[in-house]
């Protein structure tokens, strides 16, 4: 009986030691996996792609996006390819701000100045409302189109709009805002001047 109990004791002790060794190796494997996951998370948080995507998701396509420009600039220089995308976002946000300022400044109704003859003018009334432009001849709608403004570097010319065959120059001075309209396909046609009525 002593031999059997001794044998049984040895078997139990050796199996406990084996289980303990197995547990320590499993514990080491889990620790290594945890360390690698922690390292992966820290790399992901500092990844320029992830940071760029987070900023991109915060954009609302409004003037408030201009607050994101400094954050975009902080990402510059880490990756040449992402720099291209970052500069594109900065430019898009800047243009959106300028576009909204121009639309709000030039929204309204514009009439042909009296120095031009209403009878021979292709357009005698221009309305800019929200983000659309409407051209009228004797209260009849000729053309309506969504605004596509090209920025200008001239301080008096705020932008240029092309609608169908018409080119419109938006200008602003001490005398108020106005629009110069020219038929782009007519060589002999004069440039017409419009003043803001309301």
Image (cartoon, rainbow, N blue to C red):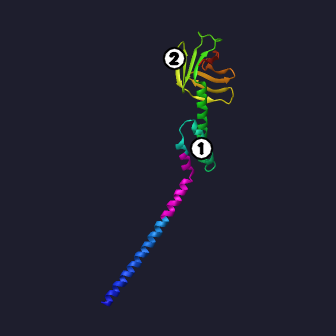
Going 60% across and 16% down the picture, which residue do you hit? Answer: 111
Q: Is residue 17 above or below residue 166?
A: below
In the image, residue 1 sits, relative to residue 44, either above or below, namely below
Q: Main secondary structure of the magenta part?
A: helix
- Using the image, tell me which numbered label, if any, was put on residue 41: none
Labels 2 and 1 touching (C-beta < 8 A): no
Position in image of residue 5 (x %, y %): 32, 86
Screen quadrant of the C terminus: top right
Q: Please tell me which residue is depicted at 58% across the width and 34% down the height of the picture.
A: 96
The answer to whether 79 is drawn above or below residue 136 in the figure is below
| Residue 190 percent across, percent down from the top left | 64, 15
Q: Residue at x 52, y 22 (%)?
A: 144
- Give the residues in magenta: 33-54
Look at mark 1 in the image and give the residue it sits on.
86
| Residue 150 falls inside the magenta stretch | no
Q: Which residue is mark 2?
A: 141
Q: Please state the horizontal and vertical placement of residue 162, each as a whole percent of the image.
A: 58, 25
């Amino acid at each position: 009986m002593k031999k059997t109990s001794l044998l049984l004791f040895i078997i139990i002790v050796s199996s406990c030691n084996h289980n303990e060794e197995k547990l320590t190796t499993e514990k080491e494997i889990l620790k290594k996996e945890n360390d690698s996951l922690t390292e992966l998370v820290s790399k992901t948080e500092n990844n320029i792609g992830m940071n760029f995507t987070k900023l991109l998701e915060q954009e609302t396509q409004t003037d408030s996006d201009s607050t994101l420009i400094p954050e975009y600039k902080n990402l510059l220089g880490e990756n040449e390819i992402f720099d291209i995308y970052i500069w594109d976002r900065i430019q898009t946000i800047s243009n959106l701000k300028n576009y909204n300022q121009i639309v709000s400044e030039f929204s309204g109704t514009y009439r042909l100045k009296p120095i031009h003859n209403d009878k021979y003018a292709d357009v005698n009334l221009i309305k800019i409302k929200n983000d659309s432009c409407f051209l009228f001849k004797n209260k009849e709608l000729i053309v309506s189109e969504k605004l596509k403004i090209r920025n200008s570097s001239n301080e008096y010319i705020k932008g240029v709009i092309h609608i169908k065959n018409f080119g419109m120059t938006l200008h602003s001075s001490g005398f108020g805002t106005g629009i110069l309209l020219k038929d782009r396909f007519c060589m002999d046609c004069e440039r017409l001047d419009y003043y803001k009525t309301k």
